[in-house]
Image: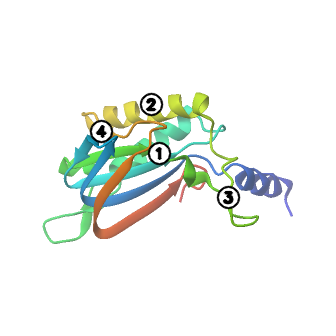
Amino acid sequence: MDAKIVIFAIFTTLFQGMRIVVQRVKRASVTIDGKVHSSIGKGLLVLAGFEDADTAEDINWMAAKMVNLRLFDDSIGVMNLSAVETGSGIMIVSQFTLHASTKKGNRPSYIRAARPEKAIPLYEEFILRTAGLLGRTPATGVFGAMMDVELVNDGPVTIIIDSRNRE
């Protein structure tokens, strides 16, 4: 086996990269301490998790991929339009549990998730990059807060994207 393939396989096993779960929603909201912090109507709820190895390149690629995903119906009912094209809302919520490992036992390990000192700047940069691509600021959660995230799935349409697995 080629050494480059082995190194890549080891790297991708150890470092899964930035992950997002994109859900097309009819509406979504984040409530903190009983107060609605943010909400959107038709759009995308994006759960975002970060690792220490994530870079500005990961953030840029992921934001561009997410805002340009063609998940909204065109005039003939085919998913052929993006959030940019439809003006749909986007809500970004940090979620370190996307990097849970369940390999050993029944208690998930979050060792792969970036610690707050690394994850917060990545989360903020992802929001800024998304805003730049959208031309408006996305709705957000609050990093590290205990949040009630409510949504009504539309479809359902749910896409999982990993920055190290650029399919």
From mark 1 to mark 3, how far is it between C-alphas? 22 Å
Residue named by callout 2: 124
Q: Earlier in the sequence, mark 4 or mark 2?
A: 2
Q: CA distance from mark 1 to mark 2?
A: 13 Å
* Of the pair 12 and 5, the residue shown nearer to us: 12
Residue type beneath disc 4 = Pro
* Residue density around tag 1, few if under 14, some if 14–19, many if 20 or more, within 10 Å: many
Crowding at mark 4 (Cα within 10 Å: few <14, some 14-19, many 20+): some
User: Mark 4 or mark 1: which is in front?
Assistant: 4
Query: Residue 79 at x, y = what percent?
Result: 27, 66
Is tag 3's residue or tag 2's residue first in the polypeptide sequence? Answer: 3
Task: Kindly indicate whether the residue at mark 1 contacts the one at mark 4 (C-beta within 8 angstroms).
Answer: no
Q: Quadrant of the N terminus?
A: bottom right
Residue in the picture at 73% in, 56% down: 13
For the residue labelled by badge 1, is the local secondary structure a helix, a strand or a loop? helix
Q: Are marks 1 and 3 in contact (CB under 8 Å)?
A: no
Q: Position of residue 118 (x, y in %)?
A: 60, 30
Amino acid on which the number 3 mark rests in the picture: Ser
Residue 86 position within the rendered picture, expressed as x and y whole percent measured from the top left: 19, 51
Q: Are marks 3 and 4 in contact (CB under 8 Å)?
A: no
The residue mark sitting in front, 1 or 2, is: 2
Instruction: Tell me which numbered mark, 1 or 2, is placed earlier along the sequence.
Output: 1
Q: Is residue 157 left or right of residue 86?
A: right
Above or below, 38 relative to 125:
below
Q: Which residue is mark 4?
A: 138
> Closer to the observer: label 1 or label 3?
3
Residue furthest to the front in view is 34
Residue holding disc 1: 62
Q: Which residue shows up at 69% across the image and 54% down it?
A: 109
- For marks 3 and 4, the one nearer the N-term is 3
**How many residues crowd mark 3 within 10 Å: few (<14), some (14–19), many (20+)?**
some
Q: CA distance from mark 4 to mark 1?
A: 15 Å
